[in-house]
Amino acid sequence: MAPEDLPPAPQQDLADAWEAQETLRGWLQQLPPRHAEVFQMSREGFSNLEIARILGLADTSVRGYKTAARRQLRQLAEQAGYTDSDSRRRPGGAHGSR
């Protein structure tokens, strides 16, 4: 599961939600600035076209930055001990072999 796909935490788990947000912030700081910026804008609800216009990028660049950010975040999550259940079911991860 990708970090941006995590469901919102129930009210009783506010401390866990806060910890998850802090963990994500730390991971975002390890990404190249443009990747983190595009990823964060996407999480805030901006469309690819909106992000492209605001940042002066091509739509294809926005998609590429988001893909790279997700890949890097997934690697950081795996290094921290989080696992993706899909990657255990399909060879080559969630998208299969390439």
Image (cartoon, helix red, strand yellow):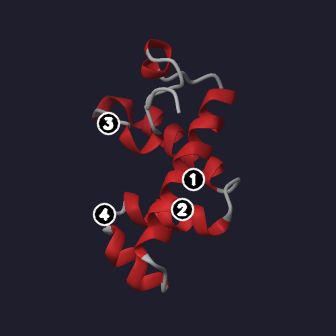
The mark that comes first in sequence, 4 or 1, is 4
- Residue wearing tag 2: 65
The Cα–Cα distance between marks 2 and 1, rounded to whole angstroms, is 5 Å
- Residue wearing tag 3: 7
Query: 10 Å neighbourhood of mark 4: few (<14), some, or many (≥20)?
Result: few
The Cα–Cα distance between marks 2 and 4, rounded to whole angstroms, is 16 Å
Query: 10 Å neighbourhood of mark 3: few (<14), some, or many (≥20)?
Result: few
The Cα–Cα distance between marks 2 and 3, rounded to whole angstroms, is 23 Å
**Residue, x 37% and y 40% (percent of image)?**
5
- Please identify the quarter of the rendering in which residue 80 is found: top right
The mark that comes first in sequence, 3 or 4, is 3
**Residue, x 63% and y 22% (percent of image)?**
81
**Type of amino acid at the residue the image marks with label 1:** Ala
Q: Position of residue 22 (x, y in %)?
A: 57, 46
**Residue, x 65% and y 67% (percent of image)?**
33
Q: Position of residue 35 (x, y in %)?
A: 58, 62
- Residue wearing tag 1: 68
> Is 21 or 38 nearer to us in this picture?
38
Query: 10 Å neighbourhood of mark 1: few (<14), some, or many (≥20)?
Result: some
